[in-house]
Image (tube, rainbow, N blue to C red):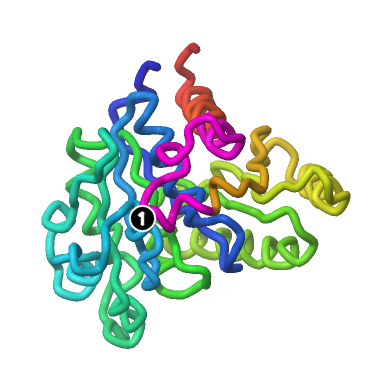
Amino acid sequence: MPEISGRVRIFAVANQKGGVGKTTTAINLGTALAAIGTRVLLIDSDPQGNASTGLGVLPHMRSKTLYDVLIDGAPMKAIIIKTDIPGLFLAAAEADLSGVELELGQTPRRGFRLRDALQPLRDGADFDYILIDCPPSLNLLTVNAMTAADAVLVPLQCEFFALEGLTQLLRTVEQVRGALNPSLEIQGVVLTMYDKRNSSSALVAKDVRDHLGDRVYETVIPRNVRVSEAPSFGKPAIIYDLHCTGSQAYLKLAREVIGRERKRASIPA
């Protein structure tokens, strides 16, 4: 598949509600994008470090993490490690990230720390996409991710209560756009954990599409046991079981993301 442009595109994968498939989406979308020929950096910005663990990078393997970048000013390239997946790289997280907000206090440009750290990568040719897995809260780490990003990708679980937080998240995107990052966009909303046996999943999906229109991806990620099992083996679902419905959905999502990028850049298919 042809490259979209020479410029790195940065997506914040964000939803302040936990358990919606955010980290699962970040891991498997990153893997799928790498599988179809792009170079991807996944930044784990969640103190729980689940994206790191889900890629088989255990705590004792994380000598330097995003904490060192945000607090000590370490260069981003110093913390990037290769994963076992060709084309996919990781900037890991650790529990110390949970104290970033207090440690930075009123430090000047504290909302721009990640953006400043990523600037050398924007100017280079190492990656096509950077995905930032945000924590499940609207805190300073999420603000840093949105300030650094070109666009936000929102995983949304197909259940009623997930809709309540969506309005708040979209409001936060508007606030970041107004105060910190005027070019921030919504790349898309991806419906996750869709259960075709449950009528409420279909109702939620319809409601979201009615409200957000074409900002919702056509691809829907189904509830899938193999996708749920994969992290315990330190593997993305696409590596754990390529042929399961969840893996195939993430490959389809990757193609849709690239299709939107091609359209945005006005490059013919």
- Most foreground residue, 37 or 56: 56
Q: Is residue 247 magenta?
A: yes
Dot 1 crowding, Cα within 10 Å, few <14, some 14–19, many 20+: many
Task: Residue 253: give x, y in percent of width and height.
Answer: 55, 34
Q: Is residue 39 above or below residue 130?
A: above
Horizontal arrangement in the rendering, residue 115 relative to residue 199 (left or right): left
Horizontal arrangement in the rendering, residue 2 relative to residue 269 (left or right): left
Q: Quadrant of residue 71?
A: bottom left
Q: Quadrant of residue 54?
A: bottom left
Q: Is residue 212 above or below residue 169?
A: above
Quarter of the figure with the N terminus:
top left
Horizontal arrangement in the rendering, residue 11 relative to residue 96 (left or right): right
Q: Tell me which residue sits at (51%, 48%) in the image.
A: 25
Q: Is residue 35 magenta?
A: no
Q: Tell me which residue sits at (75%, 39%) in the image.
A: 213
Q: Tell me which residue sits at (54%, 42%) in the image.
A: 187
- Most foreground residue, 55 or 141: 55
Task: Residue 11: give x, y in percent of width and height.
Answer: 43, 47
The amino acid at mark 1 is Ala
Task: Residue 252: give x, y in percent of width and height.
Answer: 56, 29
- Look at mark 1 in the image and give the residue it sits on: 148
Task: Residue 70: give x, y in percent of width and height.
Answer: 24, 70
SS for callout 1: helix
Q: Is residue 14 above or below residue 197?
A: below
Q: Is residue 146 above or below residue 256?
A: below
Q: Tell me which residue sits at (14%, 66%) in the image.
A: 63
| Majority secondary structure in the magenta region | helix
Q: Which contiguous range is marked in magenta?
A: 229-251
Q: Report how many numbered discs are placed on residues in the image.
A: 1
